[in-house]
Image: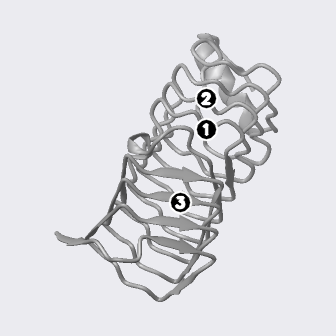
Amino acid sequence: MEKEKEEETTHINKRFENIIWEEKHIIGRNFDTCTFYKCSLKGCIFEDCYFEKCTFEECDLSLVKFKETSVSAAKINKSKAIGIVWYEASNPLSVAFTDSRISYSSFYGKNCKKAQFINCIADEVDFNNCNLSQSNFAGTDLKNAIFNNTNLTQANFVGALNYRISAAVNKIKKAKFSLPEALSFLYDLDIVLID
C-alpha cells in the first residue's frame, strides 16, 4: 500500500473531481467543506485525518478505513460505501447517506444520533450497540441488517424494507414504522398467525 503525505495538509472549500486514490495511506490531512465528485477512494486508509462538512457525490468509498479520523456532518450521495468499518472512526460520527449502497458495513457501538440513511441499500449492516435515536431510514432496504441493543428511539422507518428488529432487545420508543413492513415485529412473539 502506498503511503502519501503531501506538504499541503489542510484543504478548505476544494473540489476533488475524478480523483483516483485507490489503496493509498493518507496521513494527517484535514478536509473542510470539500466536495469529492466521481472519485475512487476504494481501499484507502485515512489516518489521523479530519473530514468536516464534506460531500461525496457518485464516489466509490468501498473498504475505506478511518483510523483515528473524524467524520463530521459528511454527506454521501449516490455513492458506494461498501464494507466500511465505521466504528474505527472517531466519535461522534455524523454522516448522511442518500441513494447509496452501504452494505456489509459496521457501525458497531457508534453514536450516530440523527443519522440519515435515505433510499439506501444497507444489507447486512451491523448496527449493534449503536445510538441511532432520531435517525431516518426512510426508503432504505435493511435486508439482514443487525439491530441488537440499539437505541432507535424516535427513529423513522417509514418506507424502509426488509428489517427485522426485536422490540425485546432494542429501544424503539416513539419510532415510526409503516405497514406492511411493521408486521415483522410479530415474528419474535412466538404466536401463530392465521390468514
- Image quadrant in which you'd find residue 185: top right
* Mark 2: amino acid: Asn
x and y percent of residue 14 in the render?
A: 58, 81
Q: Residues within 10 Å of mark 1 (few under 14, many from 20)?
A: many
Mark earlier in primary sequence (1, 3): 3
| Residues at discs 2 and 1 in contact (Cβ within 8 Å) | yes
State the residue at coordinates (68%, 28%). 152
* Mark 1: amino acid: Cys
Query: In the image, which is nearer the foreground, mark 1 or mark 3?
Result: 3
Query: Marks 2 and 1, how far apart in space?
Result: 6 Å
Which disc is residue 112 wearing?
A: 1
Mark earlier in primary sequence (2, 3): 3
State the residue at coordinates (80%, 43%). 158
Query: Marks 2 and 3, how far apart in space?
Result: 21 Å
State the residue at coordinates (61%, 27%). 165
Which disc is residue 127 wearing?
A: none
Query: In the image, which is nearer the foreground, mark 2 or mark 3?
Result: 3
* Mark 3: amino acid: Phe
State the residue at coordinates (59%, 10%). 190
Which residue has dot 3 on it?
A: 51
x and y percent of residue 121 in the render?
A: 56, 57
x and y percent of residue 75 in the render?
A: 64, 62
